[in-house]
Structure formats: C-alpha cells, structure tokens
Amino acid sequence: MSTTLTVDFFCTLDGYGMAEGWPGYWGKEGPEVIADRVRTFAQEQVLVFGATTFRQFRKFVTMFDEPYYDSLNKLPKLVFSSTLEAPLGWANSTVLDEDAVTAIERLKRTTDVPMRSHGSISLNRALLAAGLVDRLEILMFPAVSGRAGDAALLHGGAELDLELVESTVLDGRTHKLVYTPHLHTAVPVGAGPKPRTADQVA
C-alpha cells in the first residue's frame, strides 16, 4: 500500500505566491483556470495544510464563492499544527501535532488515497527537501510581482532537478506546469565535461 503527494502552487513569473496590493489570481482569473481548479478538487484525495494556510482557507470558504469550495469542504483535510485544537471550524479536518516530514513519510507507506498540499510554504519546502513530493504542479500567472512579492516556495529551498510531465496554457496566458521533482545531486568538481579548445570550437 502506498500513495502519492502532490504540491500545488500558484505563482507569478518571478516565483512569488502572493503580492501585496494585487487582487486574487493577480487579476487574471479566467474560466479555464477555474475549470482546472474544479477538476483538481473533484478528485478523491486528502488535502494537507500547514496551520497558516489552513486558517486562510477556512476563512476563504465562508467569505467567497468559488465553484470548487464545496469540494474543499467535503474532502478530508490534515493540518499540521502544535497550536490548533479541535474543533477546527472546518468540516472533515484533523489536526496532527507531529513532525510533518515523519508523518507524511509514514502516510505515504500506509495509505492509498492521494495527498495534495496547496500553499503552505514552509511545510512544502520541508517536504520537497525530504524528497517526499511526487508531483509539483505550478500554475504560473502572467505577472511579475517584483518588490511586492512574498511567499516564494522555491526561493532558498532545496536544489531540484525537474522532469516535465505536463504543460498546458489556460485562458491563453496562464501556464500549468506539472513536474516530477528529484533532489539535485551535485556533480563532483572536475567530473563535468571538459572545456573545448579554440580549435574544437572552430
């Protein structure tokens, strides 16, 4: 018995997941992006959150009316937190007060329902660094956050080699990129290709 873990991340071209002063989806929400979210969360899966993202989504599903929020409410949810306690205020939610890397490694071996984590920057950096992520799904919006940018999942994290398994353009402008991530192994000094001489270049 085993399962997979997908990390799901929205960002701008410069890799930021949030930008102060910009609207949701950086003002570029389109029907194909929303349809993709509906399909994504209609699948059988367990949603995995860090405490901050869990609190945000718990509030979002009561404040806004996205067509996939009903699925979010119905799906089972795990939140890693040492401060949250039951009742959690969001249906089908369970809190785990334990190390996330250890718990996810165990769950991947002992369960068969796929897991998906959206947002949750520090949690997903740790899971990527531990080599526990099977799919990295990036929805890259056509904007540059620049100085307003915040919450960059891949900045300062583990070095990764990425195998592209899917590439889709939504609404003619937003790229959905799906990768299989592998922890990068550095090539020993002197083991790489030797530089060519001027005669070889000519």
Image (cartoon, rainbow, N blue to C red):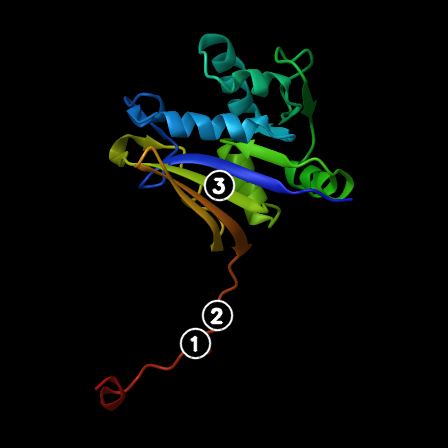
Nearer-N-terminus badge (2/3) = 3
Tell me the residue that label 2 is attached to.
187
Q: Amino acid at mark 2?
A: Val
Q: Give the CA separation, mark 1 to mark 2.
A: 7 Å
Q: Could you say where residue 199 lies in the image, as x and y percent from the top left?
A: 23, 90
The image quadrant of residue 113 is top right
Residue 116: x and y in percent read 59, 34
**Does residue 65 appear left or right of residue 71 in this picture?**
left
Q: Is residue 149 toward the left or the right of residue 60 in the image?
A: left
Q: Are marks 1 and 2 in contact (CB under 8 Å)?
A: yes
Q: Nearer the viewer, mark 1 or mark 3?
A: 3
Residue labelled with disc 1: 192
Residue 199 vs residue 77: left or right? left
Q: Quadrant of the C terminus?
A: bottom left
Q: Where does residue 154 sit, x and y in percent of width and height? A: 43, 44
Neighbour class for label 1 at 10 Å: few (<14), some, many (≥20)?
few
Specify the amino acid type for callout 1.
Gly
Tell me whether the residue at label 1 lies in contact with that at label 3, contact meaning CB atoms closer than 8 angstroms.
no
| Contact? badges 2 and 3 (CB < 8 Å) | no
Front in this rendered view, residue 56 or 171? 171
Q: Secondary structure at mark 2?
A: loop
Q: Earlier in the sequence, mark 1 or mark 3?
A: 3
The kind of residue tagged 3 is: Glu
Where is mark 3, residue-wise? 137
Residue 124 appears at what percent x and percent y? 54, 38
Q: Look at discs 2 and 3 and give the one toward the viewer.
A: 3
Q: Is residue 62 above or below residue 33?
A: above
Residue at the spot 65% in from the left edge and 30% down from the top edge: 44
Please give the name of the residue rendered at 30% of the width and 84% of the height, measured from the top-left corner: 196
